[in-house]
Image: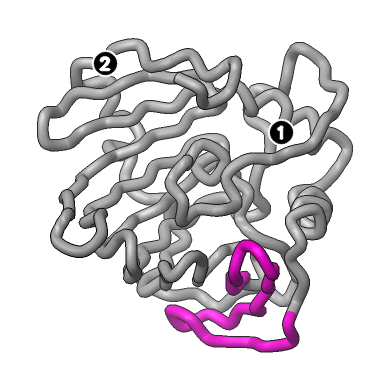
Amino acid sequence: MGNRKSPDQRFLPDFSLEHTMNTRIFFFSALVASVVSIEPAVAANPVLHPVEAVCIRFDMKGQLMNGTTLRCHRKNGFEQFEVQDIEMGIGNIKQKQKQHTITIGDTVYAIDTATMTGTKTINPMYETIVGAMKGRSPEEFGRTFMASMGFAPTGERKTVAGIECEVYSSSGLGSNCVSADGLTLEQDALGNKMTAVEVSYDGGSDDNYRLFEKIEIRQGPDLSNGLNI
């Protein structure tokens, strides 16, 4: 995958739905904790990220997990997939995990690529997020979210995977480095670090978005009352 220079216009971090549904400790920007009034129906393909299509490959190193993650989205974040090949655990207690997660609108498919089976779950935060973004650009929504999480620019800039990014820090949540077009290229939290090594503005292959159509899918847990499952 080739690198491309970021445009000059400034954006804030990636608030695509892959972030909102990832409950792993490392991805600390998972849920939007805001109370909003929304309409029952949302746009068919809302703009959830300023970049139309992108793929980022990350190296993950830390106390809890090590390995690689590929994250891609298209249609400005309405469709996403994430492929993880990681080892999780502490000390001698470790477990390898290979998982393929697909998000299309409010629907999340979590696929175990070893057994080629998966679950289908509805993201209960989807309409809340889209409602909160109504009348705002992804950039404006990003600024509000970042401020509510306590993130502020440190003044430091880095080059990660050939792209310049600005470092934001929060006393309780660590730091991340965000490009001018809103891509999170580095995250550091709780002793775990995720660093982009390749960036391509192509969105990835269609097969990775449609894998759920070719395997056995069962209904996942009902998350409408939170994560108490």
Q: Is residue 163 left or right of residue 92?
A: right
Report x, y in % for residue 76: 60, 44
Report x, y in % for residue 18: 50, 42
| Residue bearing mark 2 | 217
Which element is circle 2 on?
Answer: strand
Q: Is residue 80 left or right of residue 174?
A: left
Compared to 93, does 10 lie above or below?
below
Q: Tell me if label 1 and label 2 are in contact, CB under 8 Å.
A: no
Residue at the image point whose x is 33% and y is 30% from the top: 110
In the image, the segment drawn in magenta is 154-178
Compared to 73, does 120 lie above or below?
above
The answer to if 164 sits in the magenta stretch is: yes
Residue at the image point whose x is 37% and y is 16% from the top: 220
Report x, y in % for residue 68: 28, 61
The answer to if 76 sits in the magenta stretch is: no
Residue 113 or residue 173, whichever sits in front: 173
Which element is circle 1 on?
Answer: helix
Residue at the image point whose x is 59% and y is 73% from the top: 177
The kind of secondary structure the magenta stretch mainly shows is strand
Question: Furthest-left residue in view?
Answer: 115
* Badge 2 density bin: few <14, some 14–19, many ≥20, Cα 10 Å: some
Report x, y in % for residue 178: 62, 70
| Residue bearing mark 1 | 129
Compared to 132, does 178 lie above or below?
below
Q: Quadrant of residue 9?
A: bottom right
* Badge 1 density bin: few <14, some 14–19, many ≥20, Cα 10 Å: many
Q: Which amino acid lies under the numbered mark 2 shown in the image of this protein?
A: Ile
Q: Is residue 182 left or right of residue 214?
A: right
